[in-house]
Image (cartoon, helix red, strand yellow):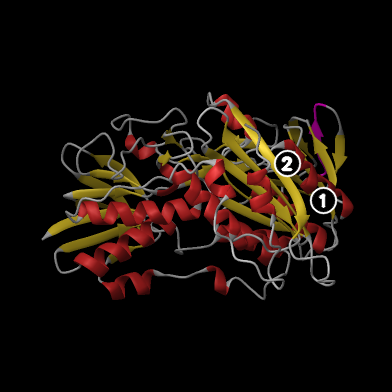
Amino acid sequence: MSKIVVVGANHAGTACINTILGNYGDQNEVVVFDQNSNISFLGCGMALWIGKQIAGPEGLFYSDKQKLEAAGAKVYMNSPVESIDFDKKEVHVLINGTEKHVESYEKLILATGSQPIIPPIKGVELVPGTREFKATLENLQFVKLYQNSEEVIEKLKNKDIKRVAVVGAGYIGVELAEAFERLGKEVTLVDVAETCLGGYYDKDFTELMSQNLKDHNIKLAFGQTVQAVEGNGKVERLVTDKETFDVDMVILAVGFRPNTALGNGRLELFRNGAFLVNKSQETSMKDVYAIGDCATVYDNSINDTSYIALATNAVRSGLVAAHNVAGKHLESIGVQGSNGICIYDLKMVSTGLTLEKAKRAGYNAVVTEFSDLQKPEFIEHDNHEVKIKIVYDKDTRVVLGCQMASKEDMSMGIHMFSLAIQEKVTIERLALLDIFFLPHFNKPYNYITMAALTAKD
């Protein structure tokens, strides 16, 4: 029987543990260490919880210590791993944060996730002797864990918190801006970039979201660098290089970086600090695997290794690693970075490369675009315009990316484009794709077909 130690039990770790025990449980002993008190929190739903769009946090969890142990794992919560001796194959742990413990392993899976990026600003400082940051002012908040969301919700019970600044206009920042506005707060969204969601969409699409936010009275402060959070014991001002905002709470949602300190210089890293893994999720060291946000992925849109931190990627990486540590060789088929967001009923989805990213990757990239109603004009109700943009390589004609936006729920369409990128489908093949027609659903010459048909030679 092989002994497998898993460090971290959130999305990637949970998927990996369940796959090992569900398929090879009689052949393997699985020991799990996690520094948190809970498992499987869906951070993508925390804005719904904060904004009171769901009744509570219960549905944001799908597993726990009891479920993993019922499947056959030995699970230690609140037990941070301090170090790993890769030569002796030993994990050094603080059980319940106090009791020193050494656990041996035959196979090791690192699912250590990511940590919030903390901008170099006044008001946040490094805790001496650690890699952790802390706020020096009350109501300066970080957001990632269940506990972070719970703390924000508790503080919002204070009626004096009327003005909130969110720093970072990626997915989490935009979602939180909506949540706070739904609670009746005056919201300012700040980002050093000139737009929101720039990592996923080209500017014509990000402008749709920017206008959507402005239409709901969210103040946009883009192109501004935060310099300080100021106040007398608690947050009173947010200072950028261009403006000063009087606020009562500041949320730092700048982004995340891979949490790879346990590698201790022994494991090869990607340019952003993530553990570099092969398609079997194995690191540069034999018998050591890395999954989820701490590890790289293979990106089919660029045919190369990349870093795309998404829960869906984390789960898939956990499945792949599980089979490999159990002795069954399995390789990832790669990812496209498919993603989506819904803010005030504006739905935006994308996969693969934006035009800007495709050009930066060296492609002779061009786009074909189309806008049309989802259904025929005679469908008078619940019939919204859909905007689609397909990025493809002018030389090979291969599809590289797609972006779609609408108040219509057209999200399932992006899965087809994800597969198209994976399988190197050309824009001409998309034009002849068998897409059914029924007025209840779409048009006979729908926006996907029309965008492909009008692609230039």
| Corner quadrant of residue 286 | top left
Q: Main secondary structure of the magenta part?
A: strand
Which sits in the foreground, 194 or 229?
Answer: 194
Say left or right for 447 vs 419: right
- The residue identified by callout 1 is 213
Looking at the picture, does residue 396 appear above or below residue 246? above
Q: Are marks 1 and 2 in contact (CB under 8 Å)?
A: yes
Magenta region: which residues? 236-241
Answer whether residue 378 is visible to the viewer in this image: yes
Amino acid at dot 2: Cys
Give the residue at the far left of this rendering.
1
Q: Nearer the viewer, residue 366 or 224?
A: 366
Residue 139 visible in the displayed image = no
Picture coordinates of residue 190 (x, y %)?
A: 77, 39
Q: Picture coordinates of residue 214 (x, y %)?
A: 87, 49
Name the secondary structure under disc 1. Answer: helix
Q: Amino acid at mark 1?
A: Leu
Q: Quadrant of the C terminus?
A: top right
| 457 to the left or right of 248 | left
Query: What residue is drawn where x is 36% and y is 74%?
Result: 66
Gap in angstroms between the C-alphas marked 1 and 2: 10 Å
Which residue carries the number 2 mark? 196
Pointer 1 local density, CA inside 10 Å: few below 14, some 14–19, many at least 20: many
Q: Is residue 240 magenta?
A: yes
Image coords of residue 367 (percent x, y): 66, 36
